């Protein structure tokens, strides 16, 4: 079972900071903030980033792996803090033009499905570690 969050985000200046709006499962009046940690341009651009979505109902931070080809991207990651910590996240976004703060810039609009399945990290038992 998944709970879906929505977002529209844009870069602050040339980055790596991102801001925007969020909704869906996080609730009303939601905000998006994030940071690009790593960017590998190419035919398929690969991005590692931190996403933070906060609203009236929930707030969470996720470490995301993004692969964008053309104007469409697929996203996979894990919630690292807040609501649904340890759950998997998957989603997609489309690159758009968006009016914000009195300007129109490139932006990314999409969804994140927070999967109701915490990641279990394997730890060696006493018999295996000894």
Image: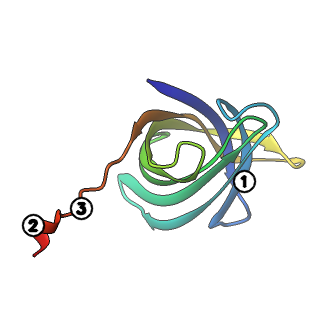
Q: Is residue 101 left or right of residue 78?
A: right
Residue 19 is labelled as 1
Where is residue 33? Give x, y as percent.
69, 54
Marks 3 and 1 close (CB-CB < 8 Å): no
Label 2 to label 3: alpha-carbon separation: 9 Å
Place of residue 126 in the rendered image (x, y in percent of width and height, measured from the top left) = 16, 67
Left or right of 68? Residue 5 is right
Q: Residue at x 80, y 40 (%)?
A: 99
Rendering coords of residue 9 (x, y %):
67, 46
Nearest to N terminus: mark 2 or mark 3: 3
Mark 3, other Cα within 10 Å: few <14 / some 14–19 / many ≥20: few
Would residue 93 be seen by someone viewing this image from the given angle?
yes
Mark 3 lies on residue: 123
- In primary-sequence order, the first of circles 1 and 2 is 1
Task: Check disc 3 and report its element: helix, strand or loop.
Answer: loop
Q: Secondary structure at mark 2?
A: helix
Residue placed most toward the observer, 37 or 43: 37
Residue that appears at 82% across and 36% down: 29
Residue 6 occupies which quadrant of the picture? top right
Distance between the Cα atoms at labels 3 and 1? 37 Å
Q: Residues within 10 Å of mark 2 (few under 14, many from 20)?
A: few
Secondary structure of the residue carrying numbered label 1: strand
Quadrant for the C terminus in the image: bottom left
Residue lying farthest to the right in this orientation: 102
Q: Nearer the viewer, mark 3 or mark 1?
A: 3
> What is the basis of the colouring in this image?
rainbow
Instruction: Tell me how far mark 1 sits from mark 2, CA to CA.
Output: 46 Å
Q: Nearer the viewer, mark 1 or mark 2?
A: 2
Residue at label 2?
128
**Position of residue 101 measured from the top left corner of the image (x, y, whole percent):** 87, 49
Query: Going by the picture, which residue comes out furthest to the bottom?
Result: 130
């Amino acid at each position: 079972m998944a709970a879906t969050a929505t977002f529209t985000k844009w870069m602050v200046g040339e980055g790596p900071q991102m801001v925007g709006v969020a909704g869906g499962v996080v609730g009303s009046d939601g905000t998006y903030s994030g940071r690009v940690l790593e960017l590998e341009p190419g035919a398929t651009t690969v991005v590692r980033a931190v996403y933070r979505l906060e609203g009236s109902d929930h707030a969470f931070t996720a470490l995301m792996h993004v692969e964008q080809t053309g104007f469409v991207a697929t996203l996979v990651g894990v919630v690292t803090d807040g609501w649904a910590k340890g759950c998997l996240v998957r989603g997609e976004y489309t690159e758009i033009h968006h009016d914000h703060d009195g300007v129109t810039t490139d932006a990314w609009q999409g969804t994140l499905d927070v999967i109701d399945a915490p990641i279990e990290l394997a730890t060696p038992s006493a018999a295996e570690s000894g």
